[in-house]
Amino acid sequence: MADKDYSLEAFNHFLDHAASKGLLKRNTAQSRKASANKILGVLEPNEVEDLRTVDLERAFEQFQNLHGMDYNPKTLQVYISRTRTAVSDFESFVDNPSSFKP
């Protein structure tokens, strides 16, 4: 049995797959992907090899410190909410694709 892939690359593939198969509305998948990639983009490549180990709150704090002035507070809260949901859905999908429900 192949090891399960929880990487950022697999996460992005999952969201593309979810949109193309109608598991998520295309706009929902795209907005979650964009938000998550902005927040997770502040981390080093080795830190996103397994998203189960990522401290999303720490990553969000780093993102705010680096880019927070570019966004209003409400937008930042939407970004972290989308990211949390997307990562949770991704982990559920990888754990058990046949029973996944967003």
Image: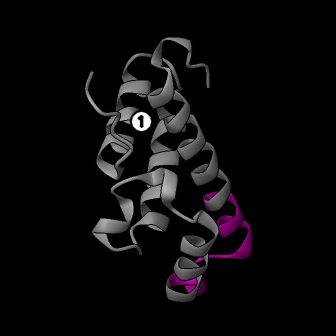
Q: Position of residue 41 (x, y in %)?
A: 39, 68
* Above or below 93: residue 87: below
Q: Which residue is situated farthest in the top direction here?
A: 98
Give, as a single range, the part of the protein colored magenta: 67-79
Q: Look at the image and say whether residue 73 sits in the magenta stretch.
A: yes
Q: Where is residue 88 in the image (x, y as percent from the top left)?
A: 59, 41
* Secondary element type, mark 1: helix
Q: Let me know if residue 35 appears in the view.
A: no
Magenta highlight: main SS: helix
Return the residue nearer the eye: 76 or 65. Answer: 65
Q: Based on the displayed image, in which of its 4 quarters is residue 102 positioned? A: top right
Residue hosting label 1: 15
Colour scheme in the image? one colour
Q: Let me know if residue 73 appears in the view.
A: yes
Q: Based on the displayed image, in which of its 4 quarters is residue 55 positioned? A: bottom right
Image side of residue 92 versus residue 94, left or right: right
Q: Based on the displayed image, in which of its 4 quarters is residue 94 positioned? A: top left
Q: Which residue is situated farthest in the front direction here?
A: 1
Question: How many numbered dots are placed on residues in this image?
Answer: 1
Q: Where is residue 7 in the image (x, y as percent from the top left)?
A: 34, 49
The residue lying at 57 percent from left, 35 percent from top is: 89
The residue lying at 29 percent from left, 47 percent from top is: 9
Amino acid type, label 1:
Leu
Q: Look at the image and say whether residue 71 sits in the magenta stretch.
A: yes
Q: Which residue is situated farthest in the left direction here?
A: 2
| Residue neighbourhood size for the residue with mark 1, other residues' Cα within 10 Å, grouped as few (<14), some (14–19), many (≥20) | many
* Above or below 36: residue 2: above
Q: Position of residue 70 (x, y in %)?
A: 54, 82
